[in-house]
Each structure stands twice: as structure tokens, then as C-alpha cells.
Image (cartoon, helix red, strand yellow):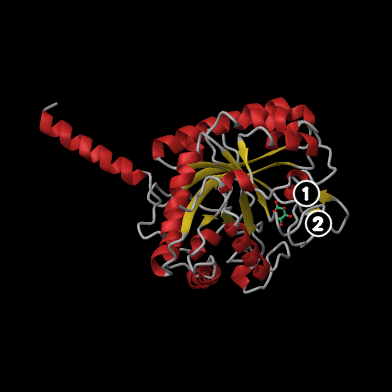
Amino acid sequence: MNFKFALSSLCLFAFSAINAQECIDRLATPETRALFKNLYRLSGKKILFGHQDDPAYGVGCKYESGRSDIRDVTGEFPAVYGFDLGRIELGQDHNLDAVPFAKTKQYIREAYDRGGVITLSWHLNNPLTGGTAWDNKPGAVASILPGGEKNILYRAWLDRVAGFIGELKGSKGEYIPVVLRLFHELNGGWFWWGKNQCSPDEMKKLWQFTIHYLKDQKKIHHLLFAFNTDRFNSTAEWFERYPGDEWIDIVGFDIYQAHDIKENAAFTAFFEKDLGMLDSIAASHHKIPALTEFGYHQIPDNNWWTTVFLPAIRNHNVVYALAWRNAGANESGASEYYVPYKGQGSSADFKKMYQSGKILFEKGLQAENIYK
Ligand code: BMA
């Protein structure tokens, strides 16, 4: 290799390496860039604990200011807060789980003031049939692509999402950065955007259209984009519907343990295998790895946090792990929850995990100044 060639390839390498460690939006706000940079930095060192709908409600409290199940158990709010936009597309004032969007906005502002990370998912209705996100008749993805019969409707839905996100501002008037997690679990077949409902090519086009629309047409520059599958068997499966590195900041997967303690060993094996594959995916593509959803329904194993969850996750690079919502009792009285509430069987063990120092909650994250 001659010297000139070596030098120019070195420059090219250095240039792409620097660029690769930035978020995809070249016009991203300073706080959004800082969020990307700091999550990238923390990956492999700490894991931010997240919880869906955390300050809104839990098993132990409903819309009580300053309370959450995580806070009742540990004394702190989580580090990451997930909320869902499902039904915003219809112009409703509350989401599919009855959380008023006005309250979500307020929770997001308070979470940001505490130094927390905000992530939004979107269980949007089926645009073709008008059914829910779980109405998985094929054809909806094709119908909302440019030229499709529902593309104009889909744009109007994105306008509403953009309207909501555009109103998220901090106390200095700066936009609050948001990790937007679209079309989650797309390798499963249960949502209308799932693998049996559209081709990989249609799905990639939908991602690209959606991100381009929000970023370049609606001019929203405070988003990091998260792409996530459900549990997966191979890197090839994970990548099948990936739109490309220029569209995605955060890479992840969702995983749930089935309701049986006997499955601890099998779950651990699967979980670790997926975490390992995600580590390589993120490292080779210069992306931030995250466990975008997880849970063990009703946590029937009192020691699950320190004997299953923590040992599996602690040696991997996911920078956050978002537990699903503590919905509490439904109409039939059955209770849905994935983190302990005060007095729940696994709360002492959860506290032990909290004290391990590896997993960050509200205060540990505050020390990291992730928006600077
Ligand atoms: C599911 C359940 C549902 C909920 C949906 C969207 O996993 O928690 O009750 O409506 O997520 O949040």
C-alpha cells in the first residue's frame, strides 16, 4: 500500500468513524446530539432502567403526583420513561390505554427536568381497515406508501404525531429529545406492520417515508429513531426489515419471559443469545443498543431480578432496558404488571438489583448529564 493511499484511507476511516457516532439527523438540536453521544458513551458501562407509563399509574397508584411503583419500591423514579401515542392519529385526547395526552405531555416535561430519557412507541390503528394495531389483515403497509390509497390519511396521522412532539419543550424553550420507536416487533405477525402482512421491501420503504416525512418535511429535529424486533433467532432475521444505517440511531429487541419459573434457564439462554447478537449489530453499525421492551408478567419468581435478569444483562451493551407497563387490574380483575409494586413478592430483590450500581435510576442518571 503506498503512503498516499494509506493516508487517504486513514482520513476516510477517521471521517466515517466520527460521522458514524452521531445521530442520523444532521440538523438535530444540541440536546438531541448530546443524548445520542451520551447514550453511546454509557453503552457497555451502565444500564438505564426504564418503565412504560411509569409516573401515570401502576398497581399501587393511579395518577398521583410524585408517585410510581418504581419510586414506591426504590425511592427513585426510573431513568427512562416510555409512553405510547396510539390513538393520537384519530385526534383522540387520550391514548389506547386511557392516558390523556395532556398528562403524557406533562409527565414528559417533568421526566426531562429530572434528567430522564423519553421514549415513545405508537400502537397506531390499522389505516386500511380502521381496526386496532392488532388487526393484522395484510395490505395496510402497502396502502400507506406514496401512491397508496391511504397515503394521504397516513400523512395526516403523522401530522398529529408531529404536532404532539413539536409541543415538547423544556423550561428554556428547547425541544425535549425523544427516542421514537416505530413499528416495533416487526418480525412478529401480530401487528398490521408485521412480517406476514408486508414484504421486507415495503417495510423498509415505510420506515424511510415516515422518517423523511417527520424529519425533513415536518422539520422535527429532536428525535432519535429506534428500530426493534421482537425476540429473534439470527442476525439475518433481525436485519430483514432494517431500513439502513442512515435512518436509525438505536437498535433493539423486545423479549418477555413466559409465565413459568421452570423456564428461567431457557429464557436466560435465549435472552443472552439475543443480547450478544445485538451487541455485534450495534458495534459493527455504530448504533446504540437497547432492550426496548421486556418483562416477566406478574414476576412470579421473587428472585428473578438478581438471578435471571441482572446476570444476563450486565455483561452486555444495551444502554437501557424498558419494562412494560404496570397496568393493574383490568375489567375482569386480572392484574397486568412487569415491575414490582410496594409489597409485591420480588420487590426486595428488585431493591437488591437497584443497589448493585450497574443499573441506573433517576439519580444515577442525573449525574451523567446526558443532555450536555
Ligand atoms: C400491551 C398490553 C395492553 C396495552 C398495549 C399497548 O402489551 O399492555 O394492555 O394496551 O400493550 O400499551
Q: Which residue is mark 1?
A: 72
Q: Residue at x 51, y 35 (%)?
A: 278
> Circle 1 — which element?
helix
Residue extending farthest right? 333
- Look at mark 2 in the image and give the residue it sits on: 61
Q: Sequence order check: which comes first, mark 2 or mark 1?
A: 2
Question: Residue 106 appears in which quarter of the rendering?
Answer: bottom right
Q: Residue at position x 48%, y 53% from top?
A: 371
How many numbered markers are drawn? Answer: 2
Q: From mark 2 to mark 1, how far is it between C-alphas?
A: 9 Å
Q: Residues within 10 Å of mark 2 (few under 14, many from 20)?
A: some
Residue 19 x, y percent position in the rendering: 32, 46
Q: Residue at x 63, y 26 (%)?
A: 269
Q: Residue type at mark 2: give it.
A: Cys
Is label 2 in contact with label 1 (beta carbons under 8 Å)? Answer: yes
Indicate which disc residue 28 carries: none
Q: Residue furthest front?
A: 367
